[in-house]
């Protein structure tokens, strides 16, 4: 069962080592203000390769293969920061080239490599948060380590060891990070050897950005949820227009009753979890969902006014398929953070765990989908409610999307 748990814990990543191209691609030959990645797997879905490319045309059912793409590590998503920097990670479970790479879109709207930084072996690096032009952080989850580095030079500055924050019988396992008011918030997932939480508790570590000094650890057991953030989804911790931080907690991914998924909040001006905000997804009935309840929100995209779009995953959506890599268990949903409701977006197809891309393009919510009819992208217009499926199709499963438009 460990590997099944690991599949969800590392965001539907491979349990085996896959190959990655050892050579750096300085510039991709494709161009455009839209970037997306695909995952090409073996038939069982448990290993394969990833690809990232830039495109200009997002309409008309155009099909894109991967001939103009750059290679990605299998089981990880790129991370786009507000600066425009695009970070690419090695294979989540290891690989042939352990480097964090920084790309940008150049003046020709092509992906251009700006630098690379070596990473420690077995690091499971998965997300980056930038504090300034000259300081950023990358979490190395399997090592209970965070590395501060200079994005301009791609040189290491310092290290934050969170291993002293482990609870008994687990690893601290730093997840997604966020910076507010010059404080680095680091989710502590506290997983055991089965990549599972052992108690309904959420924890985070807080550090000063100025010198990486430890401020405090915060912890809550009253909210009844655990597993803060989905490690490779940097959108699983975000700030709304009121300055409040929200944390998507994945619980035990639906495998252990009582260890639940949900959403926590840290209010503006405060540095502790808000005990008055309780949003347990495991017992929130979902409108339009045949099996009533979701196990987790696997991918998030906050917009405004408390509205969060997501991929909600429920094992009960495809109970006959026991292969967690290929089962169609992902449903596009809209989450109202203020009213604490979840609703399925009718008309958008369900997807497997690899086809989980999400983003915003020209005011529309974009969902990647790996469904029975096609692999590609669909859109939902929040203003009109209009849905367009099969906007473009791709080779492989659409795993990441970002539009600079």
Image (spheres, rainbow, N blue to C red):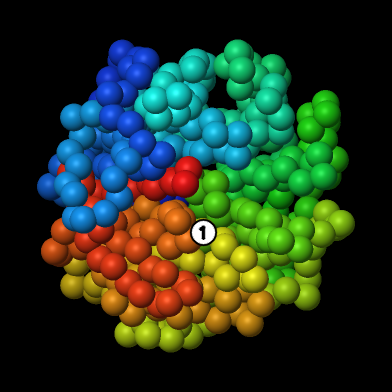
Residue 22 in view (yes/no) = yes
Residue 98 in view (yes/no) = no
Which is more toward the observer, 13 or 122? 13
Q: Which secondary structure, mark 1?
A: strand
- Give the number of marks: 1
Left or right: 113, with 337 as reference point: left
Which is more toward the observer, 76 or 32? 32
Residue 211, percent from left and from top: 83, 26
Residue 296, percent from left and from top: 46, 66
| Location of mark 1 (residue) | 301
Label 1: few (<14), some (14–19) or many (≥20) C-alpha neighbours in 10 Å: many
Residue 91, percent from left and from top: 37, 31
Residue 118, percent from left and from top: 50, 16
Tell me: residue 240, above or below residue 136.
below
Q: Residue at x 69, y 17 (%)?
A: 157
Rendered image quadrant of residue 48: top left
Which is more toward the observer, 216 or 72? 72
Q: Residue at x 31, y 23 (%)?
A: 28
Q: Residue at x 26, y 54 (%)?
A: 59
Left or right: 110, with 349 as reference point: right
Which is more toward the observer, 17 or 348? 348
Quarter of the image with the N terminus in it: bottom left
């Amino acid at each position: 069962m460990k590997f099944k748990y690991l599949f969800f814990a590392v965001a539907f990543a491979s349990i085996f080592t896959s190959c990655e191209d050892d050579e750096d691609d300085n510039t991709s030959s494709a161009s455009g203000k839209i970037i997306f990645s695909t995952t090409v797997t073996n038939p069982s879905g448990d290993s394969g390769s990833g690809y990232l490319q830039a495109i200009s045309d997002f309409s008309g059912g155009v099909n894109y293969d991967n001939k103009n793409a750059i290679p990605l590590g299998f089981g990880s998503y790129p991370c786009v920061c507000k600066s425009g920097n695009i970070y690419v990670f090695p294979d989540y479970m290891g690989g042939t080239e352990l480097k964090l790479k920084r790309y940008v879109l150049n003046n020709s709207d092509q992906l251009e490599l700006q630098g690379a930084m070596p990473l420690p072996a077995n690091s499971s690096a998965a997300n980056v948060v930038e504090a300034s032009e000259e300081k950023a952080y990358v979490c190395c989850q399997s090592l209970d380590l965070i590395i501060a580095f200079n994005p301009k030079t791609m040189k290491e500055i310092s290290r934050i060891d969170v291993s002293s924050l482990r609870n008994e019988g687990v690893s601290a396992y730093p997840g997604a990070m966020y910076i507010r008011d010059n404080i680095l918030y680091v989710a502590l997932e506290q997983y055991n050897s089965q990549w599972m939480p052992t108690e309904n508790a959420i924890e985070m570590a807080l550090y000063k950005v100025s010198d990486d000094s430890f401020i405090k650890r915060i912890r809550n057991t009253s909210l009844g949820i655990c597993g803060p953030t989905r490690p490779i989804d940097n959108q699983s911790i975000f700030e709304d227009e009121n300055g409040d931080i929200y944390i998507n907690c994945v619980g035990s991914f639906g495998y252990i009753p009582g260890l639940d998924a949900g959403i926590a909040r840290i209010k503006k001006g405060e540095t502790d979890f808000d005990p008055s905000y309780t949003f347990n997804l495991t017992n929130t009935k979902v409108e339009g969902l045949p099996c009533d309840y979701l196990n987790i929100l696997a991918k998030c995209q906050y917009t405004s006014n408390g509205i969060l779009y997501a991929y909600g995953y429920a094992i009960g959506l495809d109970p006959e398929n026991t292969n967690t890599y290929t089962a169609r268990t992902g449903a596009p949903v809209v989450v109202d953070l203020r009213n604490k409701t979840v609703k399925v977006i009718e008309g958008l197809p369900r997807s497997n765990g690899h086809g989980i891309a999400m983003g915003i393009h020209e005011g529309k919510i974009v969902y990647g989908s790996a469904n029975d009819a096609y692999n590609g992208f669909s859109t939902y217009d929040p203003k009109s409610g209009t849905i367009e499926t099969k906007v473009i199709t791709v080779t492989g499963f659409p795993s990441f999307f970002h539009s600079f438009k």
